[in-house]
Amino acid sequence: MNNSYIEKAEEAILHTYNRYQIVLDRGEGVYLYDVNQKAYLDFAAGIAVQSLGYNNKEYTQALKDQIDKLTHISNLYYSVPMAEAAQKLKEASGMSKVFFTNSGTEAVEGAIKTARKYAYGKDGGTDHEIIAMKHSFHGRSLGALSVTGNEKYQAPFRPLLPGIKFADYNDLESVKALVTDKTCAIMLETVQGEGGIYPAEKEFLQGIKALCEERDILLILDEIQCGMGRTGYMFAWQEYGIEPDVMTCAKAIGCGVPVGAFVLGRKAAEGSLAAGDHGTTYGGNPFVCAAVSKVFDLYEKEHILENVRQVGTYLTEKLDGLVDKYDFLTERRGKGLMQGLEVNGRPVGGIVDRALENGLIIITAGSNVLRFVPPLIITKENVDEMLEKLEGSF
């Protein structure tokens, strides 16, 4: 049955993904099932999206209820879900203003525009620069691609946005060396995801924050993958004792519906985008905002952050044990339930393929890292099951 659906998809869908040869049909808890009813323990969560797992009854009921009321009205009007979702996101972050988007990429676009408008408001110039990080990933649109520090993704689509410079992640001096009077923002992921699961070092992030305050530069933190509880904090930067001027988020903020947001601190909110500067037709519609609002409710009700800290510690210990046990595993990196194992001496894709055969879904990050970003509801027993399937794949 798999093959017939795969053939139909390949005939109709533009081939920009090399998809695994399974057709997923439904999910329950932390398991996915294909059309042949084979079960897969999911340690990818739709690339860090499905934090509440699959078929959470309260979440799906909230969406069903909203469908019966209203799905779209445009941003010319207010809606109850938009107001509630924005207030909950504002309170969770402690920041000032929210703009809802359709995706993480669009949130990054909004963050870039915020930084440029903030600088324009100060000096009227249009030649401002942004410092981003090597090996970063911020999205596939031309703007987001411009601040993505990976030549492989950028090369076919040049020219990109001008005025983008790339520093070395976790090297404060390399950032300082690029700062000029034209610098309007420094942008980075609090934990690099696609680049190989690299958390920011505390001294590095605090140093960048101090630099931004000193030079009146906006600090943009990309929390699209590492935010919404994945590291054991609602947003990863909250562990570091700093606050960004702009934060981008998406993925788990909606747990499956297409929604993102960029969130502004007071300084950025008061000095950047104004009426007419930015917009979106679908962004923040009642349907997706009903999802966002319910996600925040369920995080509190189901003690998601506490579970991440407990199970994340257990997962960390177990992955460290694998590094000690196997010579081809050279390092574990990450925080909470965002972890990576660096693989050397054998193709990481082969491990992922064999894991899939064994009923385990994991994905890669970069060219040689196994990435573990499971639903945030997993248990220690799920970790044990994952380890058994993973070692069988080795």
Image (cartoon, grey):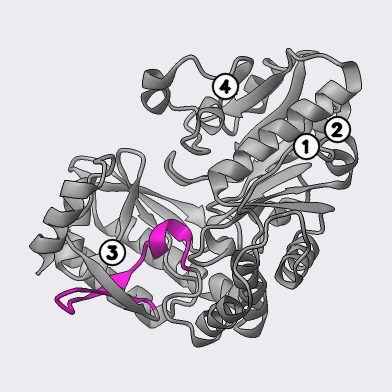
Q: Dot 4 corresponds to which residue? A: 166
Amino acid type at image mark 2? Glu
Q: Mark 1 near mark 3, Cβ–Cβ under 8 Å? A: no
Amino acid type at image mark 3? Ile
Residue 209, label in figure:
1
Marks 2 and 3, how far apart at CA: 43 Å
Q: Residues within 10 Å of mark 3 (few under 14, many from 20)?
A: many
Does 369 sit above or below residue 381?
above
Residue 199 in view, yes or no: no
Q: 86 left or right of 364?
A: right
Residue 266 percent across, percent down from the top left: 88, 46
Q: Mark 2 near mark 1, Cβ–Cβ under 8 Å? A: yes
Q: Dot 3 corresponds to which residue? A: 361
For the record, the magenta segment spans: 30-50
Q: 156 left or right of 192?
A: left
Marks 4 and 2, how far apart at CA: 20 Å
- Please give the name of the residue rendered at 46% of the width and 59% of the height, measured from the top-left corner: 48
Near-viewer residue (149 or 346)? 149
Near-viewer residue (378 or 5)? 5
Q: Disc 4 or disc 1, which is closer to the eye?
A: 4
Marks 4 and 1, how far apart at CA: 17 Å
First in sequence, mark 3 or 4: give its number. 4
Marks 3 and 4, how far apart at CA: 33 Å
Q: Is mark 2 on a helix, strand or loop?
A: helix
- Please give the name of the residue rendered at 55% of the width and 86% of the height, measured from the top-left corner: 58
Name the image quarter holding residue 203. top right
Q: Dot 2 corresponds to which residue? A: 213
The magenta stretch spans residue 32: yes
Does 145 sit above or below residue 7?
above
Q: Disc 1 or disc 3, which is closer to the eye?
A: 3
